[in-house]
Amino acid sequence: MEMTMKKWMMAAALAGAGTVAQAETVAVITPYLAQPGTQMYVEGFEAAAEEKGWDVNVVDTAGDVAAAISRIEDAVTQNVDAIVINVDPAQVAAGLIAAEQAGIPVVGMDAGSDPLLAANITSNGYAMAAETAVYVANRLNGEGTVVQFVFDAFPPVQIRGVIADAVFGNYPDIEVLDRITPDVSDGGIADSRAQMEAILAANPDPGSIGAVWAAWDQPALGALQAIQDAGRGDEGIVIVGMDANPQARAAIAEGGNFEASMAQDFEGIGRTTADTVGRLLAGEELRASVIYVPTQLITAANAGE
């Protein structure tokens, strides 16, 4: 009997030694992979996930927000360990409900806050928008006209527009000429350029446009192209964006109309998202549902850093 028990214990030990722990599986779902910022989020997340030994599946619905619901539901059916989204959670609620019912945690990677998310990892859009809008107001000495490029369909960008509205509204002598929502299917540069061309044509006099405030860099770059092509680069039209992607940094470093942008730590957001997912998978209860990653104002003085 004792020998039989020893043999059983040895067999169990050998079986255990041969067992390989299954990697955690995480689905990352976004309609916005065409955006440079989203690409960097995902790269940061994937780098951290690789260090953790996770199996990551990145799904891009190419601008189709509705399709993101089906992709979340697919991930639930596949019984992944966690889901990361970069999309307005309010627009994919059906998918998030399916994940909640299956007990799968969902973390937002610059997605917006929602009770169905365990946490949202993002930059402080309120602070970013305030800093860039005040930069514009100061450059205009508190008076002049501003063209705004916004995107209210995506919460992290929508809040930037709200704060810019408040800042400009607090200056009696600043007039918002237009508040434009560009087509972002290609990232936003092309349509922003076309929209800015129309505004330039409608306001042909030098000084009639004081500044362009953009809630992210692509519209700022499109506006810059339109201003340069119209031969109006020497009018002193101030352009600011947000995200400080490489193309924006290069434009800012040239010292022309594009003067400033806010640098988000995109890789840091991706890595912090991965760390947050890891904490949830380890059974930790998060105390904060919104986790902010620091930002920095970029001008010609530090654009090359």
Image (spheres, rainbow, N blue to C red):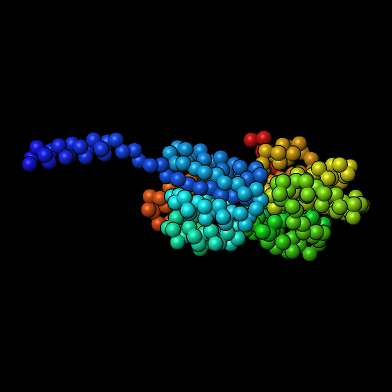
Number of numbered callouts drawn: 0
One can see residue 143 in this view? no
Residue 95 appears at what percent x and percent y?
53, 58
Residue 22 appears at what percent x and percent y?
38, 42
Q: Residue at x 88, y 44 (%)?
A: 230
- Left or right of 40, for residue 185: right
Residue 85 appears at what percent x and percent y?
55, 52
Residue 218 appears at what percent x and percent y?
72, 46
**What is the residue that sits farthest to the left in this orientation?**
1
Between residues 288 and 206, which one lies in front from this camera angle?
Answer: 288
**What is the residue that sits farthest to the right in this orientation?**
205
Q: Residue at x 42, y 44 (%)?
A: 24
Q: Where, quadrant-wise, is the N terminus in this rendering?
A: top left
Between residues 228 and 31, which one lies in front from this camera angle?
Answer: 31
- Left or right of 5, for residue 175: right
- Left or right of 226, for residue 299: left
Q: Quick check: 109 above or below 17?
A: below
Q: Where, quadrant-wise, is the C terminus in this rendering?
A: top right
One can see residue 235 in this view? yes
Q: Residue at x 34, y 38 (%)?
A: 20
Q: Residue at x 56, y 55 (%)?
A: 70
